[in-house]
Image (spheres, rainbow, N blue to C red):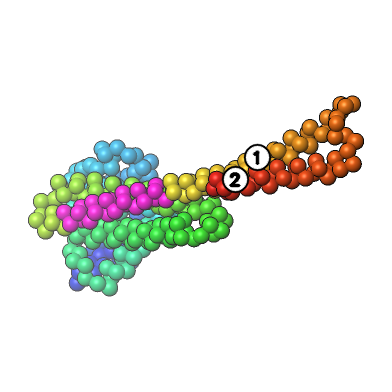
Amino acid sequence: MIRAFTLADGRLRPVADLAATPEAAVWIDLLAPDDEEEALVERLLGIDVPTLEEMVEIEDSSRLYHVDGAAFVTATLPVRAGAGRPTATPVTFILAGARLVTVRYDTPRAFETFPLRAERLDLGCADGETVLLALLDAVIERLADLLEETGRRIEGVAAEVFDGGADSARQGYRGVLQAVGAEANMISHVLASLVTLERAIAFLAAARAGKETRARLKSLSRDARFLNEHTTFLSQKINFLLDATLGMISIQQNAIIKIFSVAAVIFLPPTLVASIYGMNFDVIPELHWAFGYPIALGLMVASAVGSYWIFKLRGWL
């Protein structure tokens, strides 16, 4: 699928037929392009569109490079974050002259919202380079929104762990662990995206000579660095909640084991009395006592009550 946009009064406007008016397009967006669509863009711009296999490579030489004057940068962006099952997808940004080409195989939220916003508002877009800067700004804003939502959910998890009460916690620890795992997964995707964006921005800043462009890239780099630090803070908080949850589960398990241990100790003296008078010897002095049976029962009850009383006095219960 190909989407193409031109500029009118600083705003993006869709291009109905890229093949008919290729010179009008300043932004060409390729979504899972087929061979015919790749060939069209390569013929129009004289570039080699990277494949998905090339985009997923992690070394810098495969993600950040120049070919025949065109700059290729690849970043990893989270997708389907709103559905609670975030994954990551590589997106390649290509600056070829005054045109921007994006190649992707999924749809990050910024690629849905940015064109609509840029059609309504003047975002300072004048060519492919400024469109790229505005698009990167939208991507970083989306990552900031994801971190804000994640932070609120983490606060909810913390309240459930520490303020939910014993009964609520006992029933909800499985859900708490699932929530902690989900938020950790989200944070890892955002962190990976920010790392790749910082590298991409630094690469573009080294290659672009315009003062205004370098200033905007510096601002984007500062925002990405701040979000990276905030992501680290949230990651530490998630680890703390995980440790706290596991600690509380351990405390509850110890309390359960304690109950069984106390019960075993309390019933040990009655078991001893019953074992003594259950022996099969011919001569047991108390065997023919008229009150032998109730006396044995009384000894068992008294030993159990005495053990319980000693535990209470020592504060073990």
Task: Residue type at mark 1: give it.
Answer: Val
Q: Residue at x 20, y 64 (%)?
A: 125
Percent of width and height locating residue 245: 47, 49
- Of callouts 2 and 1, which one flags the residue occurring earlier in the amino acid sequence? 1
Residue 272 appears in the picture as rendered: yes
Residue 42's disc is: none
Q: Residue at x 29, y 61 (%)?
A: 141
**Residue at the top extreme of this rendering:** 282
Occupied quadrant, residue 20? bottom left
Residue 80 appears in the picture as rendered: no
Percent of width and height locating residue 264: 67, 40
- Which residue is disc 2 drawn over? 311
- Which residue is disc 1 drawn over? 265
Quadrant housing the N terminus: bottom left
Which of 10/136 is in front?
Answer: 136
Q: Secondary structure at mark 2?
A: helix
Q: Residue at x 27, y 68 (%)?
A: 118
Q: Which residues are drawn in magenta?
A: 218-241
Q: Secondary structure at mark 1?
A: helix
Q: Considering the whole magenta stretch, tell me its main secondary structure.
A: helix
Which of discs 2 and 1 lies nearer the camera? The answer is: 2
Q: Was residue 13 drawn as part of the magenta stretch in this picture? A: no
Percent of width and height locating residue 262: 63, 43
CA distance separating discs 2 and 1: 10 Å
Percent of width and height locating residue 243: 43, 46
Task: Residue type at mark 2: give it.
Answer: Phe
Q: Are marks 2 and 1 in contact (CB under 8 Å)?
A: yes
